[in-house]
Amino acid sequence: MLLEVKDLRVEFPTRRGVLTALNGVSFSIAPGEVLGVVGESGAGKSMTGAAIIGLLEPPGRIAGGEIRLEGERIDNLPYEKMRRIRGKRIGAIFQDPLTTLNPLYTVGRQLVETMQAHLPLSDAEARQRAIGWLEQVGIPAAAQRIDAYPHQFSGGMRQRVVIALALCAEPQLIVADEPTTALDVSIQAQIIALLKRLAREQRTAIMLVTHDMGVIAETADRVAVMYAGRIIEIGPVRQVVRHAQHPYTAGLMASIPPLDRRVERLAQIDGAMPRLNAIPPGCPFSPRCPEVFERCRVARPELMPAGATDAACWLHDQPGAPA
Amino acid sequence: MVAFVISRLLQALPVLLAVALISFALFTFVGDPVAAMLSQDASAADRTALVHLLGLDQPWYVQFGKFVGNAVQGEFGLSYRLSRPVSTLIAERAPATLELAFCAAAMTLCIGVPLGIFTGIYKDSWVSRLLLTISLVGVSLPIFVLGMLLILVFAVNLGWLPSFGRGETVQIGWWSTGLLTASGLKALILPAITLAVFQLTLITRLVRAEMLEVLRTDYIKFARARGLTNRSINFGHALKNTLVPVITIAGLQLGGIIAFAIVTETVFQWPGMGFLFIQSVGAADIPVMAAYLLLIALVFVVINLAVDLLYYLVDPRLRAKR
Ligand SMILES: Nc1ncnc2c1ncn2[C@@H]1O[C@H](COP(=O)(O)OP(=O)(O)OP(=O)(O)O)[C@@H](O)[C@H]1O
Ligand code: SF4
Ligand SMILES: [Mg+2]
């Protein structure tokens, strides 16, 4: 496995007690694999990505569990060691390309500094490669555009630059947090196609956070569904989309229109996700679940095999297994 | 670029004219120069003659036109108090004020900016908290109180530094400098500190606030996610982005330092323009006051222009696109 997350717990100490933003999150990503991550706003998708690249915002902290990259623990590394991993082995793409590039540096300079932070390249070599990367991500006239500033690019072009920045030190994994949400609908598909193509060429794995089930269906190999700081279902994309095992996932999928049309946001299931300080005992989804029964309100289900996926739902508890 | 400078200068003209009008109005509304210049027993005819000689019988706009015309040539007439040309008086006093102001400004920037960066980056360390608490004192202590305290401690009690004056000066052309003699440098220390402390604390707090703001931005997070070193993030990406607002304030502060030198110069009897101004106010010496006001306005205009040019250098978004 390239990335293994085991029992990850992220806490935020606040004045009114400790908030647990992620609780018992476990999953893994194989080399070159695309893992889609979906879930309502506030489910903990971005938090998971931030924990993996080691950039949780203080006072947020990893309070338990472990994160391994090629078997080596990276959740407890000192800052400088983790810095060498960021960009070099795990890249990141953020949501809004208008704000992720430094407005005062040319795109070329940002590419060059990123590569030189990780690779032993001379200025001339780095510049040459930077032009190459801009060409790779489809910036026309890259040799001239390399000296342009971010504000001289359109939103879509800037996200291409961001992708080049994320890939330029050739990481094995990219955490892409809603990479197209801020973009014009007409260019979202191009950006996703670009990301997918480059990742395949470089054999880069992607953790792709998105609200767009269409993108997930087309791009991801596996999907993780998050709810209230937990993964409640994870499995191969076709299985999760067509044969969801968790009632929450089923609700999500039922609301997807046919594949040839895209939805902006996941359709609503009645009720709202509980706030972090008010997660009910037992199954966190129980107040909204159409199939809720006694046990759901008292005992919390962990991920368990359910059909071709893993789901955290008592409906799938095998008779005889320990409760 | 040249067009930009010219357009900015044109925009500054109304400001300068307004200040000129105020200075000019001083002549009309404060005091009566004719009465001041005539002897007690002058006749009405003498008075009319003098009024005519001074051009005071002409409509105000003609007088104002003349005033502006003269001012442009640096001509402000004679000081009522000292009976010497105002331009000469100001030229004599300007070096003292400018040397004091630039020393204070240099202290402000060389100490204030690094402190601001430090307290911004290490916002939770106890050193930062201590510095911020001290800076609160600096902001709230009136300048003259600080000046007196420094005099009391270093001049009166310890006797290390002089409490007034400029020390020995050396003449270089028309410029008299105190920077080349030991006594001149010693005399500069206390006034410069007094003048710098307020601005220094202000700039520290400003740089810190800007730093905190910038460190929260997405592009700084992304720079971290790209694995850049702390050094290049803090001192490259973050610092450069704090520069635009900091340049603005630093520019205004430099103007403020020159203008506020009045208080410091009075406390230390520093023979600069501010001290001259206060003495002139005491004696209702209108020509000197008018010239000083215009000069300060001009200083602010020039600084504003310099600030705009610096923006231009720092921020590519402001550079005109063809
Ligand atoms: N600084 C913080 N202090 C306390 N709680 C926080 C803080 N930042 C985030 N949270 C909480 O952590 C939870 C997870 O947030 P996260 O940003 O990961 O959600 P998300 O799934 O990415 O949602 P979205 O789709 O809106 O991006 C949210 O409930 C949020 O309220
Ligand atoms: S455990 Fe119970 S409440 Fe939770 S999803 Fe399954 S059936 Fe619904
Ligand atoms: Mg998010």
Image: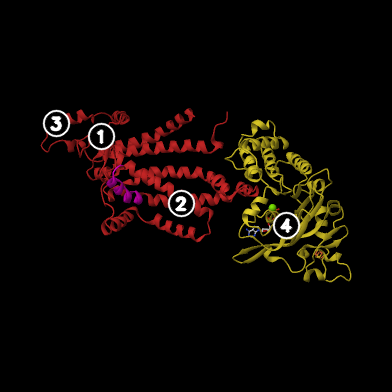
Residue beneath disc 3: B46
Report the magenta residues as a range. Answer: B180-194
The yellow one among the chains is A
First in sequence: mark 2 vs mark 1: 1
Dot 4: chain letter: A
Residue beneath disc 1: B88
Residue B204: mark? 2
Label 2 secondary element = helix
> Residue A180: x, y in percent?
72, 44
> Residue A290: x, y in percent?
82, 62
Q: Which is more foreground, mark 2 or mark 4?
A: 4
Q: Which is more foreground, mark 2 or mark 3?
A: 2
Tell me the crowding category of disc 2: few under 14, some 14 to 19, or many 20 or more residues within 10 angstroms, Cα based: many
Task: Specify whether disc 2 shares its chain with disc 4.
Answer: no
Are the residues flagged by discs 3 and 4 in contact, CB closer than 8 Å?
no
Q: Which is more foreground, mark 3 or mark 4?
A: 4
Of A23 and B17, the residue lying toward us:
A23
Q: Amino acid at mark 2?
A: Thr
Residue A72: mark? 4
The red one among the chains is B
How far separated are the C-alphas under marks 3 and 4? Answer: 102 Å
Quarter of the image where one finds residue A322: bottom right
Q: Amino acid at mark 1?
A: Thr
Of B123 and B114, the residue lying toward us:
B114
Q: Which is more foreground, mark 4 or mark 1?
A: 4
> Residue B161: x, y in percent?
28, 53
Dot 2: chain letter: B
* Residue A162 vertical position relative to residue B157 in the rendered view, above or below: above
